[in-house]
Each structure stands twice: as C-alpha cells, then as structure tokens.
Image (tube, coloured by chain):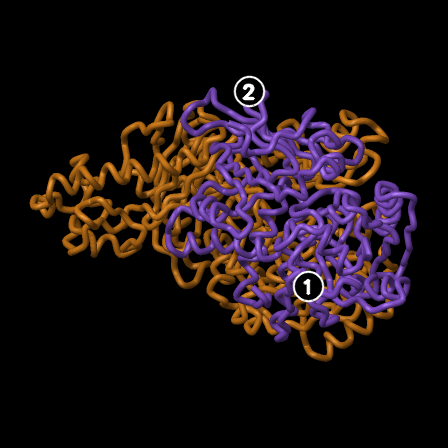
Chain colours: A purple, B orange
Amino acid sequence: MDKLTLDKIDDFLRGTAFLGTGGGGNPYVGGLMLRQELEKGFEPKLIKADEVDDDDLILPIANMGAPTVLVEKLPNAKSAVKALRKMEELMGKKAKALIAAEAGGINGTLPFIVSAYTGLPVIDADGMGRAFPELQMCTFGVYGVNCSPVIVRDEKDNEMVVNAENNHASEMFARVICMQMGTKSEICLYPMTGKQMKETSVHHTVTLAYEIGKSIGDARVKGTDPLEGIVDYFKNSFDKRFCKLLFQGKVTDLLRETTDGWARGEVKITSLTDPNDSILVKLQNEFLIALKDGKPLAMVPDLICLVDLENAEPITAEDVRYGQRVNVIGVSTPPNMRTKAALDTFGPVPFKVYDKFIPIEEIK
Amino acid sequence: MQIGVDVGGTNTDGVILSEGKVLVSEKTTTTEDVGDGVFNIIKTVLTKGNISPDKISSVMIGTTHFTNALVERKKLQKIAAIRLSLPAADSLEQMIGWPSDLIDNINPIKYFAKGGYEVDGREISKLDKDEIKKITEEIANKNYKNIAINSVYSPLNSEMELEANEIIKNIIPDANISLSHSIGKVGLIERENATIINAALANLAVDIVESFKNALKKLNIDAPLYISQNDGTLMRPDKVKQYPVLTFACGPTNSMRGAAYLSGIQDSIIVDIGGTTSDVGYIKAGFPRQSAIATDVGGVRTNFRMPDIISIGLGGGSLIRDNGNKVGPDSVGYRLTEKALVFGGETLTATDIAVKHYDLDIGDKSLLNNLDESTVKNAKKEITRLLEDAVDKMKTSAENVPAVFVGGGTILNKENLNGISELVIPDNFAVANAVGAALGQVSGEVDRVFHYEKLGREKTIEQASNEAKQLAKEAGAKESSIEINEINENPLAYLPGKSVRLQIKAIGDLENY
C-alpha cells in the first residue's frame, strides 16, 4: 500500500481495532474524520521507513486521554496540526514525515488526518505495534529517543510543553495537563531523526493493519471463515508472525473496576461445547494476558484480540458484553518488542500480570 | 380493562386484558391511514368481546410507524441542527456518514455555537445568547421549524440545551425543538444522529398521536392513551409528540415482553417467529436484555436502547429449496395465503412443511399429498438447526434455559430443542406483541458520571437509585410497585475520584393498572 484511499478505509480501520487489542479507543470517530478528508479528494501518502533521510525530522502525533471522552469531544485535527507546528518551532526545522505513536485504535488514524491538513507523508511504522495506555510504553523511548519535549494542547489553544527528567515522568506530567484539558489532548512527542525512527520503530504496522482488516473483509465477501482468513494471513505475512486461535467461546462473566485511574477487569470465556472449559482474559485498558487454569496462553506484549465468532469484527474492551460469542486470537510481536528493555517497559512484569514473559509460540 | 394494540408494517393486532388475562384478541391488516387501523382493531375487539368503551381504563399502542417513516424516507421534515461545542468538537460536521438520499430528504442547515461541558462538569465555554439569537434568526428567515440541539456532554448536564431552547422558543414560538440530552447517551455523534432523526419526525409524531387520540374519541373511549418505548415501557402521548424516536424498536420489545407475560416465565429465551424472520431475544426479570452495540436505523448510526436480538431468515413464509436442505432466508411474506402450496399456490414454504409434518388443520392438506417425505424431513431438520443456532447465541450460560415461542410462525416447531430446558407455547401466542404493549409499565432512568470517592460506592448507588425511582414516579408509576430493574457501572479510565458512569433504571406499574 502506498496510498490510503477511500476503498481501503474500512479494512484499515478494522485492522487498527484488531491491533488495539481491546484498547486504544473505538476507531469509529477517527474513521469518520478520515473519511471526511478523503471524500474531499485528498489521498494521504504512505512511505516506507527507508524513504526518509537519516537527518530528517520525524514527528509522532497522537491523541491522549480517555477513549470515552474522545467520542464526546472528538479528536481535533487543527489542534493536532498546531502541536506539530509548535514542535517544529522548538526543533528549529520542518518535519519531513509523520508517524503514529500507536498503531492500534483511534491513534492509528490521526496521522493520516493531520497528513490531509499538512500534506506530510505518513511512515509505515509506529512506536507500539499495538495499543498501550502510557506514553513511555513506546519502542521509540525503549531504544533511546527522549519522549520530551511533549507538546500537550487542546482546541482552546492551551498549549503546554513538558520537559521531564525521563519518559515515565513525561507521561505523569502530561497526564495531569491532559486531565485539566478535559481528559483529551492532542500531543506531539518523541521528536526524532529519520535514523532514530528507522532504528526504534515497529515497522510496516500501517500495512499490517490494512492487511489484517482486508483478510477479514475478503473472507466475508468470499463467504469463507474470517478466522481462517486472519490465521492464514499471519502465516504468510511479510514479517512471519506466529498466530493462533487461543480459545473459542462465549463471554460468561465480566468484571470491571477502576483502580488507580485504570479500567481493570477480567473476562471469563467459556467453551461452547464444554461448560467446565474456560479461560480468563485480564485487561487494563488493553487485553494483557489470557489464562487457562492459571496457566498463560499468551501475554503482553504479544497481541490478544477478541473478535466476533461469526464475522471476526474486533471487539474493544468497553464493548465486551455477556453472552458474546468470540474467538480469542493470539499473535506474536516482532523481536524489537520482546527485548529485555522492551519487556521492562511494557511486558507482563510492569503490568503486574505475570512474573516473566513467555512468547506465545513457546506455550503449548 | 386495558386495550393493547400493535401496529406493525403488515399486521395490526389488538387485545383486551382484564385483570391480567386476555379476554379478546384479533389480527387485522395494517391500513394506509394508521388512525383508521387503530380505530378498526379496537372496534373489532370491543365488539367481539361485547365490551362497553367505558370499561376501558387505558389504551396502549405500540407502533413501528416512525421507524418505517425513516427507513422509507417518508414524511420527514427539513431540519436545522445546532451543536453547542465551540471551540471543541467541530472536526466532524453533523450527519457525517448518513446515506445521501436521507440527507437530501431532510435538507439540513448546520450550525456550530459556543457551549458544551467537559467530562468533569466544567464548561467548555459559556453559552453565548447573542450567538444563539443570531442563529435562530437565520433559521427563522429560512423558514425552518424543526431544530435539533446537541451540546457536548449533555447527558451529564442539560442546562445549556435548555437555555438555548428558551432563546429559540422566544424567537420561533412554534418551533419543534429536539434536545439531545433527553434522547441519547454519551457518544456525541450517535446522540446527535438520534436527535436529528427525532426533529425530522416531529410533525409526523403530532399527526400520528392526534390520529390515535381521534380514534379513541370516535370510539367513546375516555381512558388515557400510552405509547410503547423501545425498552418496553410506556410514554404519554405528549412525550411521544416530543420524542417519537424513542418508539424505535418497540415491536420486538413488545413481543418479547408479551411472551414473558403470557408464559409466566421471567427469565427465558424468546423466539418470535413471523412470516419472514424470527427474532430471538433474552428476557431477564421480564425485560429484554439490551444491546450494548451501536445500532443502525435506516442507515444511520445511533445509540438507542435496543433489545439484544438476533434476526434469522426463518418464518412461516420461508422458501424451501434443495430438497428441503435450504430454508429461507427469502420468504413469500404477507402473500403466504396465496403463494403457499397448502393455500393452492405453487411455492413450497415452511408453513407447508409444518402442516405436513404435524398434520395441522391449515389450508387444504390434500394439496400436499404429493410432497416428498424426505423433503419434509430435511426441511424440518434444517428449521431445527436454524433455531438451535440462534437460541445458543443468545444464551449467557451453558445451562439449559426455558424458551417461549410466540408469533404467527410458531407452528413451525413444537418439539424441544437442544439447549432448551422446556419449550413453552403460551395461549394467545400470535398476539404476544399487542399483549406486550398492554403491559403498561413506566420507567425512570439515571445515566451520569458519579465519583465514588465522595460517598462511597454503596451510598452513591443508593442515591442514584432513589433518583431513578423518583423519575419513575413522575412518569406515572405507582410508588409501591417501583423497583430497580437495572444497574450498570462503567468505570471511566484515567479519571480521578473513582469516576463511574452509572446507568440505573427503575420501573413500576401504572397507577390505574
């Protein structure tokens, strides 16, 4: 894919929801905004990471806040563009390309909307390869890019620049500002060179999102099983991901609570054929670990995705409901998301769901 | 005694209930003029039961008329839409993603103005009265009367919408104004869509409600009139005039509620088999389980409270093909009595299979003498499979649950199915929806963000529950009958103070029930 066109948008959005692994916000609103731009005739240009020069300025752009607020206040494209311009001013040079900080959920679409306003190309890569809830949980930061300065701004042109001692501190201070802005801010962060981007990002994730969505869409059109479409896709995909059906069943219990500002919860999924056979999926905004009889089937940062049993539509954590029939799919993540440094930032230990990371392909 | 009427796309059904029992029931064909149809059916049941109009204590009508008006793009008004949000929430215009023929039909003019709230209750910006006046004058000049107002986070605070409403009323006294906080939940776009649809239906709502009232007048019925809402509770006619959109999806809700009532089972699967489709839903405590997923109506995304149902292409008129191995999803529909073999037609339908299999006294059985046994067997097996699949999808646990079968197509299956503990076909199964309409309960609902940190969880829920009960009372419920029907807690991630969106619904019987 080298251009995101109207005919590709549904597949792309479905793929970003899949990569959201339950979090990242429902891409519906971002999808409408993108469609609005594309219908005006604009075609955002997608470029490969190696198409930029090593000393080009590359800027990630995102929405920060609660997904529930985004559906009420809506992402603001003009504010996002101004965040970008402010960062250019601070860096003393013009950006050459945009990149998604987070490929999953609503933030997968925002760079394309900003691209429609600025004409800047979007790089086929991101900093999470999925969705994560905090700014420091990003491969850019894991491999040495400074999260600060972070431009945090809103539609009223309140604009703050966070310069913090480390990436975790950037998250803490930006979060407080974001809440003051109504729990929704446009942010520009992790300013980096083309070289840094090439070395630290998760590559091809825009194409990945589109192709995942397309594998589901194509199966529906052909009348074949969309689950097989997904599994086959990953088996033959360009970066050879490991993918398997972890479980098939019906949501039979659902626990949600807020602790320390997080939406935590557990989803129990019970087999359609054997009532004593069930798994537990734990979530903290995103699905973090799937357990069967206390033993893990897959864990963060590997992807755990719930999709509708019939049509394979990805289900966000807030949309999970009792009685839903689902397939639980696990997908491996690329090597740069599984190094010690990466796991120390967004592995099972910092999320406190398991004492060590076990790759999905090593779990029987 | 209560009269229940269901005005569907094809049939208009009526029942008279007395002390909870069905005295009389009747099915007629829906007429072009909805008021005439209601007049006819009520007259028919009164005559049939030899009941004097002064014995009637209330009349409840469920109608799909407003849904159909939207789907068929008929009798919709041109609308003006105002969003109170600036400088926020202006990145998507009103009615983005709507079908273009519908947009052309209601020919909207769109405005953005200052206003709206943050999630924590602060104002995004103050409402600018002069700005609203200016917009209203423009609307008046263009001779638009139907206006939809939507403020950011109106479900948390309705003040600005009410204030704007006052200003507009002063300038355009006969305006039909729809306010989003009364219609939808959190989700700006979906709520706004519903509000705009509501505004476009406002004139039709007045006509329909008046025609219902006139029908009752002509019949000398002095009893109060109620109209079904999508959640199975009732509204007064004046509220329907203001909020016709809240009647959407009342059809399946009524049939499920009616089925639960007729069977006396409060927790069960409900299967409503019609002529073309079967709706399968789940009743909990006598009320349909609500869908959590955004629903499309007439191609427009909304967040109405809709019953969680699945529709499958199986009904009395379903076409049988492939030696019985393929059933539906297409159907001869309302032309069953001319097309089906058993009625002298030339099309093999699911009804023919049922008549042959169960040896029913429907139509002329002898016309089925040449029907191949294996076709009947295969088709029966396929019908069972379709029903079992649908039932299984609606279940919340692997345990077998009772299932209540209603609707005209109930003849298709009489045996117990896999996954069902007991198959119940109640008396008056064919008019379950009219019974559902007659069931007369009203509700009060609270849906806001609360902070548990202040009062603790228990106390907060208790307070919100009391508020919901008070709202139910205001809607006409008998105080002693009011109970809490539903509590949903949705924690808001990232927010301090243990913020939770609480949705609490209280329901109760009508005073005169």
Reading the image, the residue beneath label 1 is A122
Q: How crowded is the residue under tag 2: few (<14 C-alpha within 10 Å), some, or many (20+)? A: few
Q: Secondary structure at mark 1?
A: strand
Total count of labels: 2
For residue A293, side relative to residue B84 (left or right): left
**Residue type at mark 2?**
Asp
Chain ID of residue with mark 1? A
Asked if one can make out residue B399 in the rendered structure from this viewpoint, the answer is yes
Looking at the picture, tell me which residue is in the foreground, B102 or A23. Answer: A23
The image position of residue B411, as x and y in percent, is 27, 38
Chain ID of residue with mark 2? A
Looking at the picture, tell me which residue is in the foreground, A33 or B331. Answer: A33
Q: How crowded is the residue under tag 1: few (<14 C-alpha within 10 Å), some, or many (20+)? A: many
Asked if one can make out residue B482 in the rendered structure from this viewpoint, the answer is no
Marks 1, 2: nearer the viewer:
1
Q: Quadrant of the N terminus of chain A?
A: bottom right
Reading the image, the residue beneath label 2 is A293
- At a point 43% along the width and 62% down the height, the residue shown is B33
For residue B41, side relative to residue A17 (left or right): left
Of callouts 1 and 2, which one flags the residue occurring earlier in the amino acid sequence?
1
Which quarter of the figure has residue A266? Answer: top right
**Residue type at mark 1?**
Val
- At a point 76% along the width and 54% down the height, the residue shown is A63
For residue B336, side relative to residue B142 (left or right): left
Q: Secondary structure at mark 2?
A: loop
Looking at the picture, tell me which residue is in the foreground, A173 or B143. Answer: A173
Q: CA distance from mark 1 to mark 2?
A: 43 Å
B364 relative to A51, above or below: above
For residue A213, side relative to residue B455 (left or right): left
Which quarter of the figure has residue B377? Answer: top left
